[in-house]
Amino acid sequence: MDYYMDISDIEIQEAMKYLEITSDDLIIRDKSYFQGNEKVQRLRYEHHLKRLKKLKKQLLNYINHEKSKKYPFDNISFNSERMETQESSFSKAKLKSKMDLSIQIKKENHRRKLLSSSMQKLLRKDFIEEKLKSEIEKKKIEEDHKREAVKMRIDNLLNQQKEKTRKLKEKLSRVSSRLGSISPQNRKFKSVQRSLSRLSNKNSSLDNLQIFHEKMLKSDQLHQSMLQEKQIKIADHNEKVHSTLKKHRSIREINEQSKLINIIGKSDYLDNHRYKKIKLITEKHAKKQKTIKEKVMKIKNNLEEESDKMLKRIRKLNNKQVSHKTKILYQLEELNKEKEYWSIRQHLRNEDARENLNRIMKSDMEKKKELIEKHLELNKKFETMKEIKEKNNQKIRYDAIQANQEFAKAKIMHVMIQKSSNPNYYSKVIEKIN
């Protein structure tokens, strides 16, 4: 098992104990150790390497700080002969203490900034989650709008198809009304018209149009047969008339022959007129039927073309909807992966922030405690030096006063010896005093 630093070193062990860093925190992990997809594995691995570098930096900073800690009053002697040296060292120590205080204040400000940034990172988690939720809701709303748009387009196409079918029915009804005024089979055509009015979709309309076409052919055949029957009846009637005339010629008189000839002429004229009228009606009916057949074929072709177009549109819309649904599912999957990635990243950052916050708070407490103890010790030594200096000054003043008193006594004695008649007596007294 490989470690990022040599944990057997005593200094590193002390630093680990002070910063509450375990040996497991310094183990070098492989990329395969971390779970998740490739992107998440790479994120966790890179975060692990950065964390190891930060821990190493913290340990080295602590070791260097411990090595650089030196108290300025460890080697101070309190002899009266080195008082000035001690005073100068005390002023230097005081200046250094002020500098240390300014450095500590800067470090404190830096730590407070780190604490505030850590708190901001912790607070950003809720903001990122809210942002991801809003993006997911926005995607869902867009998907619903797109589905509604596709549904509306399909409904519009179906409504257009229904409108075209309705117009076709109206055309067929108009054609049937025109045909009913000419054709003798008006009742049958009306039944066909009623059957066409029940059409509900394009397939049934095409089938009914085919049935209508077949019925029209049958109607034409029936009409032709009826015309032939009428022609046969007319011929029979003419024969009967001629036979009747022959009978009456033998009975009636010759003066009535001209009258009969006129009647026969009128009858022939009426027969010819009736035949011409029937022929004209037959030709008109044939033309109308031909026109109707052409219109029916045209309508049938148009319906087939519209049906093909409609099927192509529906197929295209279905393919587009399937591709759009696939795209939306893919985007949702990518969005979930991205959400998982950012969630893991934020979780790792929050863990680092909490660990750094705990270490910084503990380090701050220890350093504040050391700083307070250091200042208390400095104040104590300052008071001690002040007291010693005051005692030395008092001693110097007392010695000076004593020296002045002795000097005054000696001067007085010297004057007395000079003025005395027996100076040897005073010299003996001085020797006794000394």
Image (cartoon, helix red, strand yellow):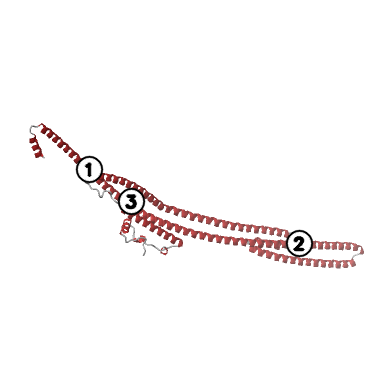
Of the residues under marks 1 and 3, which one precedes in the sequence? 3
Image height check: is 312 above or below 410?
Answer: below
Q: Amino acid at mark 2?
A: Lys
Of the residues under marks 3 and 2, which one precedes in the sequence? 2
- How crowded is the residue under tag 2: few (<14 C-alpha within 10 Å), some, or many (20+)? few
Name the image quarter holding residue 382.
top left
Image spot of residue 102 (x, y percent): 34, 46
Image spot of residue 379 (x, y percent): 26, 45
Q: Which residue is mark 2?
A: 287
Q: Closer to us: mark 1 or mark 3?
A: 1
Q: Which residue is mark 1?
A: 389
Name the image quarter holding residue 208.
bottom right
Which residue is found at the position 87% from the left and 62% from the top? Answer: 265
Where disc 1 sits, the SS reads: helix
Q: Which residue is mark 3?
A: 364
Q: Amino acid at mark 3?
A: Asp
Work out whether residue 154 or residue 22 is closer to the camera in this orientation and state it. Answer: 22
Q: Closer to us: mark 1 or mark 2?
A: 1
Q: Is residue 208 visible?
A: yes
Q: Is residue 387 left or right of residue 123?
A: left
Work out whether residue 83 or residue 347 is closer to the camera in this orientation and state it. Answer: 83
Of the residues under marks 1 and 2, which one precedes in the sequence? 2
Where disc 2 sits, the SS reads: helix
Image spot of residue 165 (x, y percent): 65, 59
CA separation in Å, label 1 and label 3? 36 Å
- How crowded is the residue under tag 1: few (<14 C-alpha within 10 Å), some, or many (20+)? some
